[in-house]
Structures are given as structure tokens and as C-alpha cells.
Image (cartoon, helix red, strand yellow):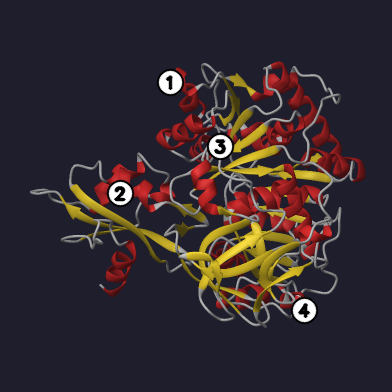
Amino acid sequence: MALRTTLVPTHAAMWGRMRLMTVFDSRPWLASYAEGVPAAIDPPTQTLTEMLDVAVRRHRRRVALEFFGAETTYAELGDQVARAANALRKLGVRRGDRVAIVLPNCPQHVVAFYAILRIGAIAIEHNPLYTERELRHQFEDHGATVAIVWDKIAATVVGFPADVGVATVISVDITRAMPLRIRAALRLPVKKARESRAALTLGRAVTGAVAWSTLIDAARINRRVAGPELGDIAVLQYTSGTTGSPKGAILTHSNLRANASQGEAWVPGLRPGNEVFYGVLPMFHAYGLTLCLTFAMSMGARLVLFPKFDEKLVLDAMRSTPATFLPAVPPIYDRLVTAAEKKGVSLSGIRFAISGAMNLPIDTVARWEKTTGGLLVEGYGMTETSPVALGNPIGPSRRPGTVGVPFPSTEIRVVDPDDPSVDRGVGDEGELLIRGPQVFSGYWNRPSETAETLLPGGWLRTGDIVTVSADGFVTIIDRIKELIITGGFNVAPSEVEAVLLTHPSIADVAVVGLPSKTGGEDVTAAVVLADGESFDADAVRAWAKERLAAYKVPRRIEVVEELPRNIVGKVLRRVVRKNLLDH
């Protein structure tokens, strides 16, 4: 196989255009596709709200959502979305407005997401475990005037200064979606019940916020609402992207619908209306958003929701409603197998498991497949690709240790990272470029960073250094962007550095990722102490935790005499990383 510049039929050509481009000759990866997987998907014709409407019509009596045993049918979900959309309209939300969601996985999250989209507004997902500083930065960037927020942190958003622009905060008690028996148990006057309740809800009204339940109960169902169009923005998904600082990736209805369709095509053994997806991935993350909020709904699946990953909760659910499809990250698969073996719980119902966000160890694959009898394959993506762009075939042609081959309607190039107009050959290291219907349209209010990331012709610079085999399988070698991937989340070193530099004992700092024993990376800081200062790593970590989400706080902090810099004074993080590894 060779690289060549030629006029070829691509996904764009199948939609009525031909383009001159540099491509992998003959797309050799097609030979590795599982039986029944097409080379291309049809172009999207449905918005995400239309997609949900179809699922509601086809699967009205089937269960759409399950939460601690409480079930919501597709018909009930459709009614709740229509009611919530009308409530948002009464608050003044209109097409193109931004509405923030700050919730863990729960039924209200699904309803809020689709209600926002139904009226043509833009949903903005946030991590509910973010600190006040992190949340405020994002709110200042996107300018949402309405926020739907977990009651445990609603007071934080209510307390934002007036210039942030949040006019209405809707407080959500997620326990109201649980069965009555569990809600009653949480109110028992015993320590364990109090602790469990405190972890799930504030347990009282939030001053300055309106309760979600009050708002929705008072709303009527109004289905006569002008909905969005395919090209409209559906989601602003915040990511550190390929250039460091958090920014909102613009994902349209067409992007997200296309990626759901690509997922449907990639797993030909799925049975519409009969699958059980487990929502252990947070839906505020691009991976969980697509695999649970959109893909599962497009399949008419039962989505079993977990507010956070907990082995006991998952195994309890496996006893009553076994999963058939589990998207997750490698540490989750390892922890589930260990817990299942210890508790004597079968995982054999899980036919398909898709791993992403970090390297999938071959030993994890072998252990999982031996335990479940199903398949575990690795894929690749990023927020900017909605998020999945590559995957290992669901079948015997999969190749553990690689991230697979391009999805249907997806093209790749491998180029010189210093000059992306120069293509690299088979087996040569280079930067991965991606083009497809799932590729985003840019960053919110960041034209210069959009131009750096999206090249002419629609090619996305991933910032990842890869090699591609003669038959099209991609192996990740390194990352240009220097982001740290920990627990499936991206951490921008510059953000952590900026916080640590405000600590009085630290004069200089460089943050890098070092290999973790559980897969992925540990956030690690190399610090130079200020003159005359003593150092307590645990105290610095506790201080940082007040200012950063827990996953961003360095697991390791190493004191060094100085940091390596280039001729213009920029810290050489790769050298820092090498020095720490050699230490």
C-alpha cells in the first residue's frame, strides 16, 4: 500500500462531490471490517430530537431508562422531554440560546439534554465535580443564562457574579428519580443512610434556584415546537483540545447523529429495541454523551444509569438487568472482573464492550473475554470527532494493541507534524489527520485555534503521533499536544501549572503525565521551591484540590533544582517527563 494524491470517491463523493486528496490507496482497512459493516453510512437526515421521536414511536412500551430499578418507558421519556422543553420556553429559552447542564448520570440529565435540543437551543455539558473556579471559567466563556444543576452544587452557580450572566438556576434532586423504597431508605435515621443521602442530594431547597420537579410538574406537554435543523449546533463540549486551554468544541446535530449511525453500523450484531446499555461513563464527557445519550437512544436500548462508577452498584444491576453492551475505560473492566470473581456474579451477558480514552492493555482484553465470553475492542476518538473516529473491528480481525481502523465514511492521513501538507509513508511515524461527517466545525469563539486545528478540506489535526500498517490499523505512538489522559479525562498541564504557581512554596513548575499502574497516566508535577521554603507534598495536594477537580490534582510531586528550557525559555515538558521516568 502507498500514499498517493488522486481523485477518489469518499464519503463526501457519495454525497454528491469528488475531491482531490492524499489518501491511503484503496482504503485497505475495508477488508478488515466485520461482516455487514458498510464502507460508508448514509448522510444524516434526522436531528437528534427527530432521532428520539422515532425511537419513542417504535419502542413506546419498552424501557428507555433505568435508575436504581426505577423504569422510564420510551413513551414516558417522550412526554417528559416535551414537558421540559415547554418549561424552558416559558423561561424564555429560544433557538440558539445556550443552556448549561451540570449533572451526574440520572434520568433528569437525559430529559434535560433532549428538552434543550427540542427547542433548538444548545446544550452545554459540565462536570458536576468541578470547582467553582473551573465552572465559572466555562460559564464566562459560553454565556448561558439558564443552568440545570445538581442540587449539591446549585448554590455555587447561584453565587456566580451577575456579570457571568446566569439568570435562572434550576436545581435537580436526582433522588426523586429513584424508586420510593430507596428514597424511604435514604431517610432512615441511621449513619449509613445519612451518608448515602448526602452523597446524592443536598436534601433541601436551594435559595435563589427553582426546583426541577416544581418546574416540570407545572409544565404542559406542547409538541408544536419548531425544532432544530441538521446543521444547527447541538452541543458545546468543553475540552482541552489539541492546544491546551479548555474550550468549547462545536458539535452539530449532524455531527452527533452521524457518529451514532457510525456506531450502529460498526456493531452489526446489535438488536434494536433489545439491548441493555450500561451508563457508567459520565454523560458530561464526549465518550459517555455519544455512547449513552445518543447511540443508546438511537438503538431503542434500555439505558441503565449510574451516577458514578461503583462495582457494587454495577454487579447488583447485573443480577437483575444484565448488560449486553458496555462502553467503558480499561480500569473499569479490570475492577469489574475482579469484583465479579470475588462476589460470584456472572458477566456473561455482556456481548460487546468498547474501550476508549486510554491505552487498553492486552492482558485486560484476555481477562475480560475469558470472563464474559464477549468481545472487548479498543477505539479512538476525541471530543472534536463527536467523539469516535476509529475502532477495532467487532470480530476476529480485531488487533489488540492498536486503536483499529477508520470508521465508515472516515478518512485518515499521516503527515509531517511540522508540515501537514507532507504525507508520511506506510509504517512511518507522523501526525494523524481525520476527515469525516463526525468532525466538529470549530471551537466556540476561538477562530485562531479553530484555524490551527481544522485544515483546508476539512482535515482535523489530532495532535497524535501514529503509525499505520499496510492494512490500515493505527497504533498511537505519542502526543504532540502534551495533554495528560487520566481516568479517561484530558488534563491540560498549563491549567494545573497555573494553579500550582500560586502556591507560596513553589517558584516554578512543569506538569506531565507518567504511566499509571492502572492504565492511562498519573498527573505529575516537577516543582522548583521558592527560596527558603519547606515543602509538604500532601499539603500542596490538599491545597490544589480546593482549586482543581480531583482528577487534575497531581498524584506525584517531585522537587527538582531547575526545569529544562529551550533557547527562548519555554519549559521542555518532554525532557521533564524523561528525567522523571529515569529518576
The residue indicated by pointer 1 is 161
Instruction: Measure how far apart labels 4 and 1 are at the Cα level.
Output: 57 Å
- Earlier residue among tags 4 and 1: 4
> Residue 541: which numbered mark, if any?
2
Q: Position of residue 484 (x, y in %)?
A: 43, 58
Q: Position of residue 231 (x, y in %)?
A: 74, 40
Q: Nearer the viewer, mark 2 or mark 1?
A: 1
Q: Nearer the viewer, mark 2 or mark 4?
A: 4
The amino acid at mark 1 is Pro
Q: Nearer the viewer, mark 3 or mark 1?
A: 1
**Cβ atoms under marks 3 and 1 closer than 8 Å:** no
Q: Secondary structure at mark 3?
A: helix
- Earlier residue among tags 4 and 3: 4
**Cβ atoms under marks 4 and 3 closer than 8 Å:** no
**Who is closer to the viewer here, 105 or 421?**
421
> Residue 31: which numbered mark, if any?
4
Disc 2 crowd, CA 10 A, few/some/many (<14, 14-19, 20+): some
Q: Secondary structure at mark 2?
A: helix
- Earlier residue among tags 3 and 1: 1
